[in-house]
Image (cartoon, rainbow, N blue to C red):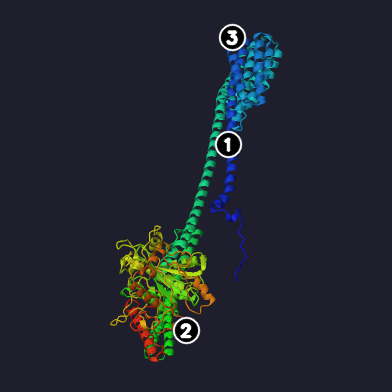
Amino acid sequence: MNDTRSVKRPAPLALSNWPVRVKVLAIVVVPLLLACVFGGLRIYSSATEAAELRHAAQRADMVPAVVDYMAALEAAMVTATEGGDARQALTVFESRRTGLQHLLDVTPVDDGVRLATNTLIDFGQNLIDKISADAIDLRTRVMTYAPLLITSETAITGLVGADDERVRSDADTLSRAVGARGQMAMQRMLVNSGAELPEPLLRSAMVTIAGTEPATVTAMGGYLGGATEQASTLRSEMVKRMALLSEPTTALVGNPELLASQKITGDIAAGLIAQTTEDIPAAVARQADDARTAAIRDAALVGAAILVALILVTLVARSMVRPLRTLRDSALKVAHEDLPREVEHVRSDGKEFPVQPIPVHTTEEVGQVAHAVDELHQQAVMLAGEQARLQLQVTDMFETLSRRNRSLVDQQLSLIDRLERDEEDPDRLESLFRLDHLAARMRRNGSNLMVLAGAQISRERAESVPVTALVNAAASEVEDYTRIVTTGLPDGEVDGVVAGDLVHLLAELLDNALRYSPPTTEVRVSAVPTGNNGLVIEVSDTGLGMTESDLRVANTRLESGGEVNPYTARHMGLFVVGRLAASHGLVVRLRSTVAGEPDSGTTAGVYIPARLLIHTAPAQYGGRDDEPVPADAHAGIATALALEVPAGVPREAPAAAAGPATDLLPQRRPGASGIVETPAETPVAPIETPVATSVAVVTPAATPVAAVTPVAPPVETPPARSEVAAFFSPRPQPTETNGHARHAAADSDPDDAIYQKMLSEWLVDPHELSHSTDLNWKSVWDHGWSAAEAAEAAPVLDHTAEGLPVRRPGARLVPGHANGEPVASAGRDPEAVRNSIGSHFGGVHAGRLRAQETGGADFP
């Protein structure tokens, strides 16, 4: 049992509905975001460090300025105290002070460093001013300068605030060296100018200044290396000075040993100052450059990593999406193009062939799915091959069964023919006739079975067959042949190759028209020529009719050329007609007999292209011999539909094509009386029905005997309409053209009257009224012909129980004949009846033999 519950589909924005490319991007978007975040942080850290180091380099550039300022301050103080070029020293000091102030203004430094530097500048200037004005003594000068040395050390270490240990060590050594140089300058001023001070006070001041030497010497010795000669010299000279200062008996003023020791220590400090002053800015600048390079490198690495990740994601996505897209497109192509074409090839040829694989040759999941689709494709082709072989077997079975049935039916027909020739009882002979018709229908059903199986019925190249003979042969295949009325059939012939199938096709249409119309109505067979030398044979009934939608469906199935579908079993005739028409390039279309009235009946039109016709009288088709023939039957239909007749310009109907249009004298036409003569020497020769004939009932034989031919009730036969613009289109509602109503039998019931009223008269062409019998007779002698015509058209009102007309002797004698005396009616002679029926059977037999000789070897 099928599950009718609807399948719940995921939401459009659900994860399962995301495209593969989006899914791949979603897989890597989190790592990419994290990489971008951490890479950005790394780049920011490197950039920040580079910026800090750049600022540190700018601050380190102030260290030489501070050192030079302290040196200028020391030189100005010593020169002013000991004597010398004080002006030059003051000029240098002023220049160094201005430069330091400028750097302090433009360099971003910490508040502590800025305060210390400003203190150096302000207090140094104040000290120089006091010394220049000689406002303070030597001891005050020394005691005022000593704190400036400590402030300079603070400023130097603050300016070199780097994280590198080596740079910090260099900055500490530089600040100690500046302090040592200042201490040596102060001690030298005391030794050189301390005579004005008392000895104890001088010694106390020098001891106080020397109290900070151990820390300074230790720092410088650490920078120089504890085992180096300069470090040892610093330590020994410091011990020597401490010894001299601690010896009370040693004179300090002008002591050469003290001056020499102070000079040695000052020179070593100056060397350290010069070296570290160059190393510190260079080291800090180098670190800043390294930091900037590292920041650029990190940014490049992070960007490259993200770019590589994006490229990899793109490549992976494309490697997944492209095979999937190829798989999808190839699978759809296989489903909609390749597989139907291959199945059709296998069905027509019966041979299997390797399928073209999907161009996805990978071994991963997508490639495996592609291989699975290839397997499905191959299996489908194999199943199609098996189905084709099975269909061929079933076709062979149907064909064999049909041929055996046809053989048995042919034997049955031969036996019935012999029985008919030997039978003299009219009742039994009538039963044999019915058996004969039933056997013919059985043979047609066998042919239908062969058409259903798709078997090709072999058709030898035979002689052409007249159109009238084709219609008569088709009528002989149906049971109620007496209800068939033909009109407007041309004198042309049909190629013998298509004649057999055309008879079969017309028989199916006639059988359908007779089956779905009241038994008291007639089925009209007419022909309409087309402008491209083609011919349309139309079968019209006044039966149940079809709605517009049913007509469209039926015409679609006819146009498909007999395609096997679930409706084939229920519409076997439609299938057979479509397949037979498609096999010969014929076109069959259905329409309502009266436009807009589905209940008016159905008209089936069969278009025969000019290539299948042999025109005995080309003028009757209204075309030229050199007129191009359409490429196919549909082109002929289009040509016929495109032809329009100008208003007021009458076109000659096929009935009048053979003679002048202006000749109003009576034209004798063979068979105008409805009696078709059979040549005595060739009794089986086909009789060509005239183009415009009176209504004649088609008998089962193609060549009936005139004396015993049953005649249906007379019907006014309108000429075939010549306007082909209405070809395969509903005709307008007919109007009553005669002054009296038509009636088929004397005892017509009300239903029969309704159907009689609905009979189509669309074949009447108002321009053909000039050929009416009432208008054509002009002389006294012509009234004789008119009387003969009226006698021939006299209705037969009595019918047998089986529907056959009852002929009355002398009912069709022309008035004024040689034997004009009334003859008393006598009873029918049984021998005469037997002879009449025997003659009728002979005509039927002759017609069938003739049909077999003229391409109807396999007439259904």
Tag 2, which secondary structure?
A: loop
Q: Amino acid at mark 3?
A: Arg
Q: Picture coordinates of residue 697 (x, y %)?
A: 41, 77
Report helix, strand or loop for mark 1. Answer: helix
Residue corresponding to mark 3: 87
Q: Quadrant of the N terminus?
A: bottom right
Q: Can you see residue 246?
A: no
Task: Residue under label 1, please give it.
Answer: 46
- Viewer-proximal residue, 454 or 573? 573
Q: Tell me whether the residue at label 1 lies in contact with that at label 2, contact meaning CB atoms closer than 8 angstroms.
A: no
Q: Is residue 53 above or below residue 624?
A: above
The answer to which of marks 1 and 3 sits earlier in the sequence is 1
Closer to the chain start, of discs 1 and 2, is 1
Residue 89, percent across and down?
Answer: 59, 12
Q: Toward the viewer: 327 or 441?
A: 441
Nearest to viewer (mark 1 / mark 3): 1
Q: Can you give x and y, in whole percent of width and height, for residue 571 in the image?
A: 48, 73
Amino acid on which the number 2 mark rests in the picture = Glu
Q: How many marks?
A: 3
Q: Nearer the viewer, residue 143 or 210?
A: 143
Q: Which residue is painted at 59% across and 28% down in the image?
A: 55
Classify 10 Å Cα crowding around label 1: few (below 14), some (14-19), many (20 and above): many
Check the image and report above or below for 381 versus 320. Answer: below
